[in-house]
Amino acid sequence: MKKMSELRMDYDGISFDAVKQIYQHRGWIIRFFKLIYVDVSTTRKGYHVRIKIEKKLDDRDILLLQILLGSDINREIYNFVRQQNGELLKNWNRMYTKKWIVLGTKIVEDIGEEKYSESMSKEVEDEIINCVDIEGHL
């Protein structure tokens, strides 16, 4: 079985064009690894991008890559604190597909609304594949 890692970026309050621009400028970082898939979902506040690569990275490297790829800095600060406080390794890099409004002990509404977009996933994947690195190489 091949070793793999998943990067999970959260982009809130920016357009999809801005998300693509991040990968136009920084996507070359991913090309150091074998890209398995890109998964983009829309959310109420923006976008979730999941990138799976064929290399087992340690948690600190995953966190660093998520920061370098412009993921929501507040989310990544929480992830850093979770790592430092010894959260269970499988649980530190949370990305919710469901969020709930809770009043007291009663769940009143599911507000997650994450929706996968095949076309957006392909666009981001294309940006990664076609990104020019800092030295001008494809």
Image (cartoon, grey):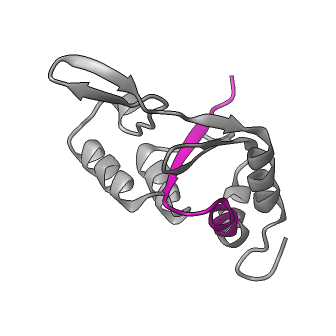
Chain part drawn in magenta:
1-23
Residue placed at 53% from the left, 45% from the top? 8
In this view, the residue farthest toward the left is 104
The quarter holding residue 92 reads top left
Q: Eyeballing the image, is 104 above or below 135? A: above
Q: Quadrant of residue 73 in the image?
A: bottom left
Position of 37 with respect to 69 (left or right) is: right
Query: Farthest bottom residue?
Result: 135
Of residues 8 and 96, the one nearer the viewer is 96
Residue 51 against residue 31 in the figure, above or below:
above
Image quarter (top left, top right, bottom left or bottom right) of the N terminus? top right
Q: Quadrant of the C terminus?
A: bottom right
Tell me if residue 20 is in the magenta stretch: yes
Q: Residue at x 52, y 63 (%)?
A: 70
Residue 53 lies, in percent from the top left, at 67, 42
Name which residue lies at 82% across and 76% down.
137
What residue lies at 48% left-to-right and 52% top-to-bottom? 61
Q: Position of residue 75 (x, y in %)?
A: 37, 52
Q: Nearer the viewer, residue 32 or 121?
A: 121
Residue ranking furthest to the top? 106
Q: Where does the image place residue 94, in percent across and percent down from the top left?
A: 41, 36
Q: How many marks?
A: 0
Q: Is residue 65 left or right of residue 135?
A: left
41 relative to 128, above or below: above
In the rendered structure, does residue 47 fall within the stretch colored magenta?
no
Residue 31: image quadrant is bottom right
Q: Is residue 95 left or right of residue 25?
A: left
Side of 41 where 91 appears, left or right: left
